[in-house]
Image (cartoon, rainbow, N blue to C red):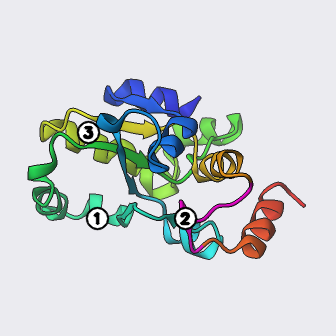
Amino acid sequence: DLSAIAARNVGVVLLSPVELVRSLRGLGNEDQRWVVIDLRTIQDYELSGAGQLAKSIQVIPELLNEAGALEKWLHHFDGSKGTHFCLLDSPRVQLDPTGLWRRLVFGEADGAAAGLDYSPAEKLAEALIDQDFNHVALLDGDFAHVLSEVKAQCGGSLEPVVINHDAYLWTKTESTAEGG
């Protein structure tokens, strides 16, 4: 599982969608409420109809690649070092064996340029840990897992946990992704 590998590589915990949704609904341990930093691309949260978590902090992934911008942005959180942050990312892309072979041998479309093996959440987790943030987690899964869990915990309803969800567009996007 790519999420587990990423968490091990960075040295953070994986937070299950079940735990995240319980926290967002105000259930469970009050001392461990999670603030979500959403690093999905605009295609993932707006154009797909997925929507966003109501209290999440939206960050464009490109911020992480701009020299000095990330450091300046992190200064806004200096007073929040005791906060529990859960980083939500776009789904990672897995290469088929042929694509992996071409990448290794020919160096074709490597890393972030190809959208492969690059996780803005993993990069931000490293930066937060370097800045002495002690409570950082990666979501174990993607936004689709969170949507399913919100529906399960809230009797089929997404609001008020998820906002700007377009059920028609999301269903259309999901069926296209599944080959339907």
Q: Is residue 137 left or right of residue 176?
A: left
Residue displayed at 79% across by 66% down: 171
**Which amino acid lies under the numbered mark 2 shown in the image of this protein?**
Pro
Residue displayed at 46% across by 65% down: 54
- Whichever of callouts 3 and 1 sits on the residue coming sooner in the sequence is 1
Residue 116 belongs to magenta span: no
Q: Which residues are magenta?
A: 156-164
- Whichever of callouts 2 and 3 sits on the residue coming sooner in the sequence is 3
The residue indicated by pointer 3 is 126
Residue 80 to residue 169: above or below: above
Query: In the image, residue 163 lies at what x, y percent?
Result: 55, 70
**Which amino acid lies under the numbered mark 1 shown in the image of this protein?**
Leu
Asked which quadrant contains residue 60, the reply is bottom left
Residue 61 to residue 82: above or below: below
Residue 159 belongs to magenta span: yes
Eye-nearest disc, 2 or 1: 2
Q: Is residue 42 left or right of residue 74?
A: right
The residue indicated by pointer 1 is 63
Q: What is the number of callouts on the image?
A: 3
Query: In the image, residue 47 lies at what x, y percent?
Result: 61, 75
Q: CA distance from mark 2 to mark 1?
A: 28 Å
Q: Is residue 145 left or right of residue 124?
A: right
Mark 2 crowd level (few <14, some 14–19, many ≥20, 10 Å Cα): few
In the picture, which quadrant includes the N terminus?
top right
Name the mark on residue 159: none
- Whichever of callouts 2 and 1 sits on the residue coming sooner in the sequence is 1
Q: Tell me if I can see residue 105 in this picture.
A: no
